[in-house]
């Protein structure tokens, strides 16, 4: 059975860690300089750029049959050596589509988010992490019958928490990220619902 939101689109048609790399060896280190280098954790780097690919499951059935979007993302993280936590900023784009009664329905959401992040065991190649923050969400829903197209969009604030783990291979990091988004509220085609979701992504990261 199609959802109320998908049905409304049809009716309208009818009438968006931290990088861990060995610090560069000084060209000439003696005395106190050499001692400082020796005391520096072997795998500390200040920042990381991460690219993510995965799947999203929307909590509400209102979005069926477009409630399982594919997710693409990019993220910048930083945590200074010795700091308890750092920060993260990122963006994610998710989309799904289906045909309902001859109408092509597509749902796209775009996120811009930022928050705090803590990475554990920064001296190890295997690094679990946690993070939380605020996200700005833009949602667009479109219906196309081939002879008529209609769309609606809305913006919402929300919150997110996530956790994952990365593994370092030389200059490269590979990992898994699980993310929960909540507190969202959007109004499309006269129907009010939320875009709360669970996201599971694989990622690859590079040091700055």
Image: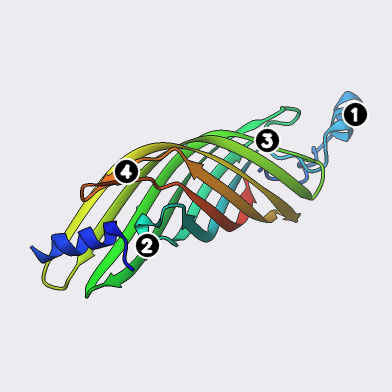
Q: Quadrant of the N terminus?
A: bottom left
The residue under the point 56% across, 48% down is: 179
> Which residue ends up furthest to the front in the rendered image?
1
Q: CA distance from mark 3 to mark 2?
A: 35 Å
Q: CA distance from mark 1 to mark 4?
A: 57 Å
Which numbered mark, 3 or 1, is in the foreground of this view? 3
For the residues bearing labels 1 and 4, Cβ distance under 8 angstroms: no
Q: Nearer the viewer, residue 42 or 32?
A: 42
Q: Residues within 10 Å of mark 3 (few under 14, many from 20)?
A: many
Q: Residue beneath label 3, please?
A: 118
Question: Of the residues under marks 2 and 4, which one precedes in the sequence?
Answer: 2
- The relative height of residue 14 versus residue 50 in the rendered view (above or below) is below
The residue under the point 73% across, 46% down is: 128
Q: Residue 122 occupies which quadrant of the picture?
A: top right
Which numbered mark, 1 or 4, is in the foreground of this view? 4
* x, y percent for residue 34: 88, 31
* x, y percent for residue 173: 68, 54
Q: Residues within 10 Å of mark 1 (few under 14, many from 20)?
A: few
Q: Residue beneath label 1, please?
A: 35
Q: Residues within 10 Å of mark 4 (few under 14, many from 20)?
A: some
- The relative height of residue 185 versus residue 92 in the rendered view (above or below) is above
Q: Residue beneath label 4, please?
A: 186
Question: Of the residues under marks 3 and 2, which one precedes in the sequence?
Answer: 2
* x, y percent for residue 63: 36, 57
Which numbered mark, 3 or 2, is in the foreground of this view? 2
- The relative height of residue 169 versus residue 38 in the rendered view (above or below) is below
């Amino acid at each position: 059975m199609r959802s109320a939101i998908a049905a409304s689109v049809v009716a309208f048609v009818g009438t968006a860690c931290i990088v861990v790399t060995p610090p560069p060896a000084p060209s000439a280190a003696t005395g106190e300089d050499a001692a400082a280098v020796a005391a520096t954790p072997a795998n500390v780097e200040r920042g990381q750029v991460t690219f993510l690919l995965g799947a999203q499951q929307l909590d509400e059935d209102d979005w069926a049959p477009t409630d399982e979007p594919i997710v693409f993302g990019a993220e910048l993280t930083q945590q200074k050596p010795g700091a308890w936590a750092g920060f993260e900023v990122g963006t994610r784009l998710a989309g799904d589509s289906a045909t309902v009664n001859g109408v092509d329905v597509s749902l796209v959401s775009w996120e811009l988010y930022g928050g705090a992040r803590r990475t554990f065991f920064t001296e190890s190649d295997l690094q679990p992490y946690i993070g939380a923050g605020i996200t700005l969400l833009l949602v667009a829903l479109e219906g196309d019958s081939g002879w008529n197209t209609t769309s609606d969009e809305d913006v919402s604030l929300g919150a997110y928490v996530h956790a994952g783990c990365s593994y370092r291979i030389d200059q490269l990091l590979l990992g898994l990220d699980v993310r929960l988004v909540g507190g969202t509220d959007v109004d499309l085609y006269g129907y009010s619902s939320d875009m709360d979701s669970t996201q599971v992504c694989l990622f690859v990261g590079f040091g700055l």
